[in-house]
Image (cartoon, rainbow, N blue to C red):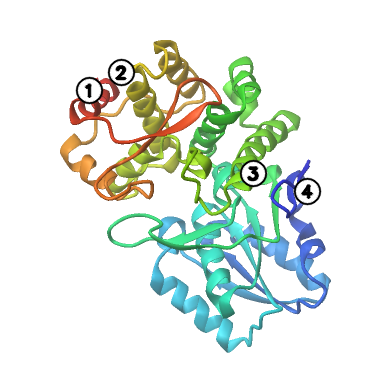
Amino acid sequence: MNIETLGYPIVVGQGLLGSVSEYLHTDTQKVALCFTPATRSLAEQVKAALLDKQFEVLDVELPNGEAAKDIEVVKAAWTQLADAGFTRSDAIVSVGGGATSDSAGFIAATWMRGVDVVHVPTTLLSMVDASIGGKSGINTAEAKNLIGAFHDPIAVICDVGVLAGLERDEVISGMAEVVKSGFIGDSELLQLVENNSADSLVTSGALLIEVIGRAIAVKAAVVAADPFELSVQDVGRAALNYGHTMGHAIERYESQKMRHGEAVALGMIYAAELASILAIAPPDLVSRHRVLLSKVGLPTKYSGGKFEEIRKFMRLDKKARGKQVRFVLLSAVGEPKLYDQPNEDVLVEAWQRLTN
């Protein structure tokens, strides 16, 4: 499956790790291969194929997880690139999950004001979300992704075969973004989740390729319509943040120890409850959220935090304007809209429904 909506190929299939060189420009000589200890063996496969095509390959090992999105890590990578004589015609290839593509994308965006980057996502979450759309970023002590840049990859290569080697919980986490994509833009994707067992959804094969491809197509269509998140008349690219206002706040409260997909699942429940309380959406939309997320193994109830503290983290949401937190809410499947901050009583009531 090849999706070209964004002007660069997003390829979904099996046995694709050796194909990176097909997407590099003819004048590229050096490739910085960004990977983590967890993805070293997959990166070695990519590296072997690049060496076979006579590319010079520089290993840039990043820490696992969110630790890769630290300015000191980025600075060390810049030093490696400088020492290796990387020029504007050379390229960066990321092999890893969302944190790896975020960090590698930011390194590519900032080195000589922008060099080519190819993402090879190795988690379901990064395939359907982080590697698509050109967002890159690093974290600060205050919040995730406050420092970043828009920098499109020249290709994204999704080899679903690599998912077989992941922990089951990691794949389940990625299903949150799949379900989110269905709710904001693809009712048939939701039906695929409803009509198939959780096991069949997270195993490699034709069904997984279709599920991933449909989720990517939703994100690609949203990004193509609002590439730099500048829409003011409509929800635009902010639709992709459905569930993320509360989700990111929970992640921050949990010191990034909760999986992103688990936090986003809870954030979607919170958003659905808000929409129900405000009479924006019917109550059965809330129940559909709970059933679908529970079916794929994601949490639908949270009991680990205090609202007063999590409320402070919501104010750092990128959709916020001044002191107002804005939420993406659904009036129906495929109909996301931005809503200014409801009154505090409504926020608290939705929290109580999420935690009770």
User: Residue at coordinates 78% horizontally, 58% vertically from top-left?
Assistant: 18
- Marks 4 and 2 sit apart, C-alpha to C-alpha, by 47 Å
Secondary structure found at label 2 = helix
- Marks 3 and 4 sit apart, C-alpha to C-alpha, by 23 Å
User: Residue at coordinates 28% horizontally, 61% vertically from top-left?
Assistant: 141
Q: Amino acid at mark 3?
A: Ala
Please tell me the numbered disc located at residue 349. 1
- Marks 1 and 2 sit apart, C-alpha to C-alpha, by 8 Å
Tell me the quarter of the image containing the C terminus: top left
Decide: few, some or many residues near mark 1? Use Cα within 10 Å; few <14, some 14-19, many ≥20: some
Q: Disc 2 marks which residue?
A: 277
The image position of residue 203, as x and y in percent, is 65, 32
Decide: few, some or many residues near mark 4? Use Cα within 10 Å; few <14, some 14-19, many ≥20: few
| Mark closer to the observer (4, 2) | 2
**Image quarter of residue 112:** bottom right
Secondary structure found at label 3 = helix
Q: Could you tell me if the residues under marks 1 and 2 are in contact, i.e. CB atoms within 8 Å?
A: yes
